Image (tube, grey):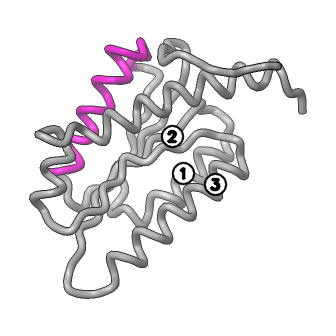
Amino acid sequence: MNIIQSGITAENSSIAIIIARFNEFINKNLLLGALDTLKRIGQVHEENILKIYVPGTYEIPTIASYIAKSGKYDAIIAIGTIIKGQTDHFKYIANDTSSSLSRISAQYFLPITLGILTTKNIEQSIERSGTKMGNKGSDAALAALEMINVMKKLKKVIYY
């Protein structure tokens, strides 16, 4: 029986981070958490990290697809915040964004991790961007690091 498990250091990896500017005061903290994790824990070099800013979370999949198609990156981290308002707009943005990112990841065999908050209010977003509920940007970076290593090991077992 073969078992593939992996660690979280990926010092020679190239990682793209796509950050939504909408709700920037929250996304900034998610980005800081992701960067700290990539550099401090993952040992990823600053020059191997590409940061791309887009208007909002809904625009992230378009850029993710472009990056994935390039084949130049080992993982993508998506960072954004979607806060429920008075309408169903929240639901459509959250569903479409996560579904699109999942499709892109599967299509290109590229890890795309979600540092995208979907919360009921600003307070929940603040709690999940570095206060009492942790930092979901950091969590997304950890997932990206592990997936990079899992994919590298998997490529040694499965040949395309």
Q: Position of residue 44 (x, y in %)?
A: 43, 17
Marks 1,3: beta carbons within 8 A? yes
- The residue singled out by tag 3 in the image is 104
**Mark sitting on residue 138:** none
How far apart marks 1 and 3 lie (CA) works out to 7 Å
N-terminal-most mark, 1 or 3 = 1
Q: Nearer the viewer, residue 30 or 142?
A: 142
First-in-chain label (2 vs 3)? 2
Magenta-colored stretch includes residue 37: yes
Question: Helix, strand or loop at disc 3?
Answer: helix
Q: Is residue 20 above or below residue 149?
A: below
**Residue kind at label 3, given as amino acid type:** Ile
Total residue callouts: 3
Question: For the residue marked with disc 2, what is the amino acid?
Answer: Ile
Instruction: Decide which of tag 1 and tag 2 comes sooner along the chain.
Output: 1
Tag 1 residue: 64
Mark 1 belongs to which amino acid? Ala
Residue 90: % across, % down? 32, 76
* Location of mark 2 (residue): 76
- The segment highlighted magenta reads 26-46
Badge 1 crowding class, 10 Å Cα cut-off, few under 14, some 14 to 19, many 20 or more, is many
Question: Where 9 falls versus 123 (above or below)?
Answer: above
Q: Nearer the viewer, mark 1 or mark 3?
A: 3
Point out residue 58 in the picture as x, y percentages from the top left corner. Answer: 42, 67
Separation of marks 2 and 3 at Cα, in angstroms: 11 Å
**Residue 31 included in the magenta stretch of the image:** yes
CB under 8 Å between discs 1 and 2:
yes
Left or right: 61 as drawn, with respect to 36: right
Q: Residues within 10 Å of mark 3 (few under 14, many from 20)?
A: many
- Out of 85 and 4, give the one closest to the viewer: 4
Residue name at image x 32 percent, y 14 percent: 40
The residue lying furthest to the front in this view is 1
